[in-house]
Amino acid sequence: MKQADISPPLGATTRTDVLVVGAGLAGLHTATLLARQGHDVILAERRTSLAAAVRTTGIFVRKTLDDFPLPAEHLGPAIRRVVLYPPSRRRPVDLVSPRDEYRVGDMAPLYTAAAEAARAAGVRTALGTRYAGRQGGTFHLAGRDGPTTVRARFVVGADGARSTVARDLGLDRNHHLLIGAEEVFALPGSDEPPTFHCVLDPALAPGYLAWVVNDGRHAHVGVAGYADRFPDGLRRALARFGATAPGLAGVDRPASVERRGGPIPVGGMLRRISCPDGLLVGDAAGAVSPLTAGGLDPCLRLSEQAAGVLDDALRAGSPDPLSAYDGAALRARFRGRLTLRRGLAHVRTPAAATAAFALLRTPFGRAAAGRILFGDRSFPEPAPQ
């Protein structure tokens, strides 16, 4: 992000309607929506550049692409094909949708574009600024220009899977986490159609999967699983997988690649995600699919719900509307995927994965996989009050 896109320093003390902590997509979207509704918003982010230290793979599903105006110039080619592999990599299940199902975002320019939209809406953005905690009715930031004390009517925790804001507000925190790592590099071109390759092997990716996304422009090669179950560590697992990853035959890996990684909450929506002082969005709220670990669609949709209840509360001059922001009600919509998550977590050996994979080769298994990968469901709307 250019220096000109950063708001003036906040000063030693300041007041605001809403303090948003964290400038991922969830924080940026929430802040922008609130500013467009006429509220004063401060957005604090510890990174000095939003184009640095990207964590997400950046896979956007069809429903997100249909419902949100993402800049097409920052999205890769459409993906219709998903290939699922057992541990042996033999006899994979090849699924092709008649519709464009996925596009992978070029996340650095996407973040920069979202930050510019926030700035244009009037959000006061403080990069290189760390959230330093709450003391009574004030929130404290530590930035490049010194400490700032913020008196905010509400605070939004968009500060990731291990949210400090959640702790300070006494809200629920994520306890079921995967860790993931990924390498991203440009491709010279590919003869095969854009494809999402997924390898189910608990010896390589315990409790989750290893993947290659090859959309013809970029390759994303990654591994994720439960931290305490990697036999020789996440980095070695990624290196081992990268040496034989499917979908990259004939591709020369460059010496320099972009590396991403971080925790992924997969315990489902947290139950208590709001209180009279504020609320949580994105990973901080557990808004990630328990099964697929996809979080970009939930982060945008939950951010819209969050901005709506905060707007109501600010206009009413009362925190009462925040009671409608109910994680327990949303969590109930994910019972099926939570059950599947528990099942996947218990597949601990390649032999068990191979046996389970046999079901995917049946008509029922293929249909179930197609429904999960190509289904029309998205993050649920709150129930009518």
Image (cartoon, helix red, strand yellow):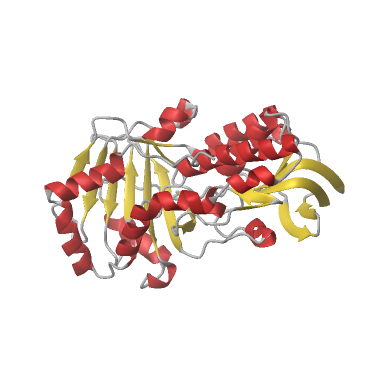
Where residue 243 sits: x, y (%)? 30, 57
Of the 4 image quadrants, the one containing the N terminus is top right
Of the 4 image quadrants, the one containing the C terminus is top right
The residue positioned 62% from the left and 59% from the top of the image is 171
Instruction: Specify whether 62 is left or right of 127.
Output: left
Instruction: Specify whether 225 is left or right of 139.
Output: left
Q: How many marks?
A: 0
Where residue 120 sits: x, y (%)? 68, 27
The residue positioned 50% from the left and 41% from the top of the image is 382
Instruction: Specify whether 139 is left or right of 265.
Output: right
**In the orientation shown, which residue stands out farthest toward the front?**
385
Q: Judge by depth and name the residue closer to the eye, 9 or 360.
A: 360
Q: Judge by depth and name the residue closer to the eye, 70 or 365.
A: 365
State which quadrant residue 166 falls in: bottom right
State which quadrant residue 130 falls in: bottom right
Where residue 350 sits: x, y (%)? 22, 67
The residue positioned 83% from the left and 52% from the top of the image is 149
